[in-house]
Image: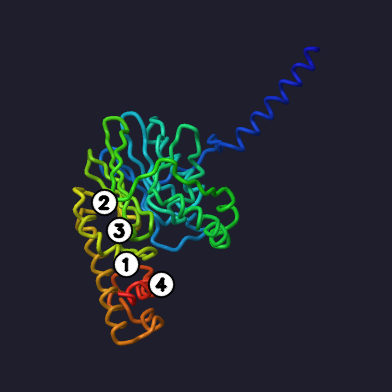
């Protein structure tokens, strides 16, 4: 074989290898504007999402997301509402530390928390979640992609991939991960905000990433069980944290004070719904009336309270 022919065969082989590799793992050579994360405790970084509905203008960036830096590795807690937001989060991590990313921890299945996952696909990274998260993603993932395509736009949705976790946390069990002189505790919860909620607790700084088990300023959203959420409040508040990063709203809150407004809203919603059920009112009346005394305390109230009331009514009418 002539040297020119050998070179040509080698070139074709290398081109095929590059194409196959790039179709499997995303390239990270492109430069992205880092998310403006804030260090709320030593080694604990968080980005405060907009209190808004997901749209193209905010890049889907409405959830609080962040990362924890240990001596050996980094754990990411949620990746945002688009691959672009995930790439910007990755850029923020690379700007902050040269430690490798070892874990992507998803606190539940909602798009604003998992649509950025594809920015972190790599052989060295493990995706972690509640034991029921794979099932929830399998049931809803493709629907979420279709539903949010017209909302955030083709350019933000086309690279989204539904990536289930491979390291799973059992309900009411704690998994402890070591990032190098830094232990984080992961706990999977029974049905509350969703059926696959997970919290992340950094033992070193007593900082708790609550996912959407805690909303602050943004009205809570019931996509799981109103009764289950209220029933678990005392156990949630008993976590020995000092600071909290809620799923939505101001980050770096004092704990457990951060729970107070949410608990009051959910209790009021349940009380109103039970009263309406006793009166014989139907679900349409409940959607209009339940929880209305809380309206002035929450942003996006009219977007979510009617659906919370509808879901809660369906659950409580069978008591």
Left or right of 25? Residue 251 is left
Q: The C terminus is located in which quarter?
A: bottom left
Q: Earlier in the sequence, mark 2 or mark 3?
A: 3
Residue 216 spot, x, y in % from top left: 30, 61
- Give me the C-alpha separation between circle 2 and circle 4: 27 Å
Residue 244 badge? 2
- Give me the C-alpha separation between circle 3 and circle 1: 13 Å
Q: Earlier in the sequence, mark 1 or mark 2?
A: 1
> The residue tagged with tag 4: helix, strand or loop?
helix
Residue 22 spot, x, y in % from top left: 60, 35
Residue at 21% from the left image edge and 50% from the top image edge? 239
- Give me the C-alpha separation between circle 1 and circle 2: 22 Å
Q: Earlier in the sequence, mark 3 or mark 4?
A: 3
How many labels, in total?
A: 4
Q: Is residue 279 above or below residue 306?
A: below
Q: Which residue is mark 3?
A: 214
Residue 313 badge? none
- Give me the C-alpha separation between circle 2 and circle 3: 9 Å
> The residue tagged with tag 2: helix, strand or loop?
strand
Tell which tag, 4 or 1, sits nearer the viewer.
1
Residue at 27% from the left image edge and 36% from the top image edge? 183
């Amino acid at each position: 074989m002539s040297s020119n022919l050998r070179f040509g065969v080698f070139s074709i082989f290398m081109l095929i290898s590059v194409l196959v590799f790039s179709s499997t793992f995303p390239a990270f050579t492109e430069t992205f504007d880092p998310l403006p994360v804030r260090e709320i405790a030593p080694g604990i970084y968080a980005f405060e999402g907009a209190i808004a509905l997901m749209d193209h203008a905010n890049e889907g960036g409405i959830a609080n997301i962040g990362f924890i830096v240990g001596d050996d590795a980094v754990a990411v807690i949620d990746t945002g509402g688009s691959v672009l937001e995930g790439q910007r989060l990755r850029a923020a991590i690379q700007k902050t530390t040269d430690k490798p990313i070892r874990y992507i921890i998803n606190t539940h299945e909602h798009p604003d928390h998992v649509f950025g996952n594809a920015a972190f696909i790599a052989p060295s990274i493990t995706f972690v979640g509640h034991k029921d998260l794979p099932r929830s993603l399998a049931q809803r993932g493709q629907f979420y992609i279709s539903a949010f395509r017209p909302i955030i736009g083709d350019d933000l949705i086309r690279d989204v991939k539904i990536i289930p976790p491979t390291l799973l946390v059992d309900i009411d069990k704690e998994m402890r991960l070591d990032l190098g002189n830094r232990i984080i505790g992961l706990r999977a919860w029974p049905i509350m905000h969703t059926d696959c909620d997970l919290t992340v607790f950094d033992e070193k700084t007593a900082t708790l990433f609550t996912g959407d088990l805690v909303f602050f300023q943004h009205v809570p959203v019931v996509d799981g069980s109103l009764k289950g959420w209220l029933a678990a409040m005392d156990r949630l508040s008993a976590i020995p944290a000092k600071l909290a990063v809620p799923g939505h709203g101001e980050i770096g809150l004092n704990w457990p004070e951060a729970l107070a407004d949410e608990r009051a809203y959910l209790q009021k919603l349940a009380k109103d719904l039970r009263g309406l059920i006793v009166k014989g009112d139907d679900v349409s009346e409940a959607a209009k009336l339940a929880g209305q005394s809380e309206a002035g305390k929450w942003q996006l109230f009219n977007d979510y309270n009617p659906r919370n009331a509808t879901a809660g009514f369906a659950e409580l009418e069978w008591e």
